[in-house]
Image (tube, rainbow, N blue to C red):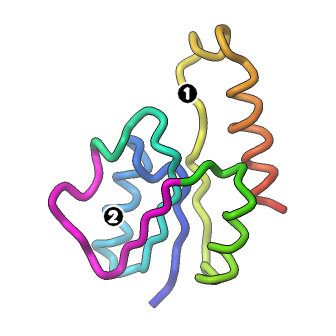
Amino acid sequence: MKKIVVTGGNGFIGSNLVNFLLNKKYFVINIDKNKYSKRSYLLRNKKPKNYKFYNLDINSKKIFNIFSKFKPDAIFNLAAETHVDRSIETPKDFIDSNILGTFNILE
């Protein structure tokens, strides 16, 4: 069974991707810090065996342990700060997540 990491898998787009991949019988590792969505779209009342969730920021060094443990075949990076109005109020959050977080995954 192929293993797929989805970061930001609890948001609207990410949760739909997670559900799609689970239906296609992939093993899905969802990494989300739950800042906005808090699983509002995802897996209501389901606990599939081919799914693992980590409540984690993509800037965390723990992400490397997850990658080492599962050795994923692919990574979908959908983790990001959203809402342009928030970027004006707190631009550092956007730089940390959207730029540095992506860089952390690539490393």
Placement of 58 over or under 50, stated as above or below: above
Label 1 vs label 2: CA separation?
A: 23 Å
Most common secondary structure along the magenta stretch: loop
Dot 2 crowding, Cα within 10 Å, few <14, some 14–19, many 20+: few
Residue 42: percent from the left, percent from the top?
Answer: 29, 52
Q: Is residue 25 left or right of residue 76?
A: left
Q: Residue furthest right?
A: 107
- For this rendering, which residue is in front, 6 or 92? 92
At x 52% / y 73%, what residue is drawn?
4
Q: Quadrant of residue 26?
A: bottom left
Answer with the quarter of the image where residue 20 lies.
bottom left
Magenta segment, which residues? 41-55
Which residue position is annotated with label 1?
82
Name which residue lies at 39% across and 61% down: 18
* Horizontal arrangement in the rendering, residue 52 relative to residue 49 (left or right): right
Task: Residue type at mark 2: give it.
Answer: Phe
Q: Residue, x 60% and y 38% (percent of image)?
A: 80
Task: Give the numbered dot on residue 20.
Answer: 2
